[in-house]
Image: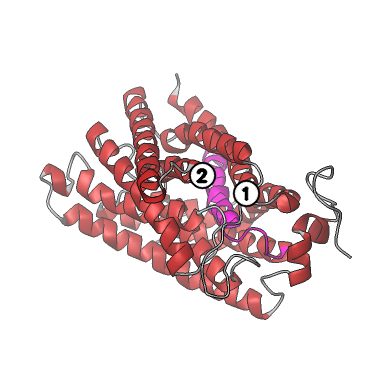
Amino acid sequence: MDMSVWFLIGAALVFFMQCGFAMVEAGFTRAKNVGNITMKNLMDFCIGTVAFYILGYNLLCGEGVFAGWGLNPFADFAETDWSNFVFNLVFCATAATIVSGAMAERTKFITYCVYSFIISLVVYPIEAHWVWGATPWLTDMGFTDFAGSACIHTVGGVTALIGAAMLGPRIGKYGKDGSSKPILGHNLLIGALGVFILWFGWYGFNGAAASNTLQLSQIFATTTIAPAVATCTAMIYTWIRNGKPDVSMSLNGSLAGLVAITAGCANVDAVGAFIIGALSGVLCSISVYFVEDKLKIDDPVGAVSVHGVCGIFGTIAVGFFDYSDGLFYGGGVYHLGIQLLGLGCIVVWTAVIMFLVFFVLKKTIGLRVSEQEELEGLDSTEHGLESGYPDFVPRRLH
């Protein structure tokens, strides 16, 4: 296959992942909010396209050290590299989508639209420019993030952590004694189908930038091994911890392995992918319980753990498992040090900007819907729907 054609097919696969994200989030939350969740995932991509066209594409792909500049997709239609535009756009939309699940079921829709726009306008494009832009100073120093464990998943996870913490937990999530209470999603099958769709799309997510068919096949291998092993270790961990294998945690284990291998998918061998997957499945499971029980942060889909924690882990793991110069392959500590430096820059940039964004939004238009609106469900209060499932969900409260 012509690799330039595969480049565009990969972009289409990444776009299809929006369906997977919507299904995971909808399945893991309650039926009274399905319409709201569907709308948010739709607008992530559509608002993201507007933001990326207006400014984000320039900041990511243009010339410049801190941020790119000089591209003009408004006027130079014939001269614009539209394959590069579309490819980077679908990745940009993914970073914004990750946040949706952590803040589900209690966030104002207008607030969601604003911060989603800002992520796609400046937050993601600038830090991604440092790694994938025309002047990628982090990559030039040796930083490796082939497909986005740091640039996409860590950014989404850090933003999700800040947003969910400032937003507060859903009503009924914690008892008076501070103990966590489960709020079950309405449809595990939809959530599981979403995970399968995401896994399918991830072959394009990780493999679209492959330079030849040999590298593409290697990426497919690592992108299969890591999530499969992570699913097994997540299942085993919950089986030992709870006495029974946990379905939703095993599904998150699959995503954890995919996130963790994304940075090094083209730079680690099968053994490295196996170890990264094994560790990420356990790490994600431990993190979910820690975020919920210790930090008291309500994350309905585990986005902070899956994308944030495992994105950080996967980025660092490249410094150990890169088969050309990783620490465990005789390469010394330089690559590991650069991974830590690059990760630190991306995390600090994201945390500072998104904290300011959420703080301003909280003090102005507000982050959260009212208690009555939350209890009634966002489908009816935010969108005028009775429900995404009108035959099964009680009509609005009076």
In-front residue for pair 142/81: 142
Q: Residue furthest right?
A: 398
Instruction: Describe residue 310's horizontal placement relative to residue 393 as left or right.
Output: left
Residue 68 visible, this orientation:
no
Q: Give the extent of the magenta segment.
A: 79-108
Q: Which colouring convention does the figure follow?
A: secondary structure
**Furthest residue in direction front, as rendered:** 243
Q: Position of residue 181 (x, y in %)?
A: 56, 62
Instruction: Pinpoint residue 267: horizontal percent, then vertical percent.
Output: 27, 39
Q: Quadrant of residue 14?
A: top right
As drawn, 254 above or below 153: above
**Judging from the image, what secondary structure is the residue with disc 1 in?**
loop
Res 64 → quadrant: bottom left
**Total tally of numbered discs in the picture:** 2
Residue holding disc 1: 185
The answer to the question of whether label 1 and label 2 lie on touching residues, with beta carbons closer than 8 A, is yes
Which of the labelled discs sits on residue 248, or is there none?
2
In-front residue for pair 141/258: 258
Q: Secondary structure at mark 2?
A: helix
Of mark 1 and mark 2, the one earlier in the sequence is 1
Please identify the dominant SS of the magenta region.
helix
Is residue 391 a member of the stretch shown in magenta? Answer: no
**266 relative to 354, above or below:** above
Above or below for 297 versus 308: below
- Towards the viewer: 229 or 322: 229
- The three-letter amino acid code for the residue at tag 1 is Gly
Magenta-drawn stretch contains 101: yes
Q: Decide which of 212, 362 is in the foreground and name it.
A: 362
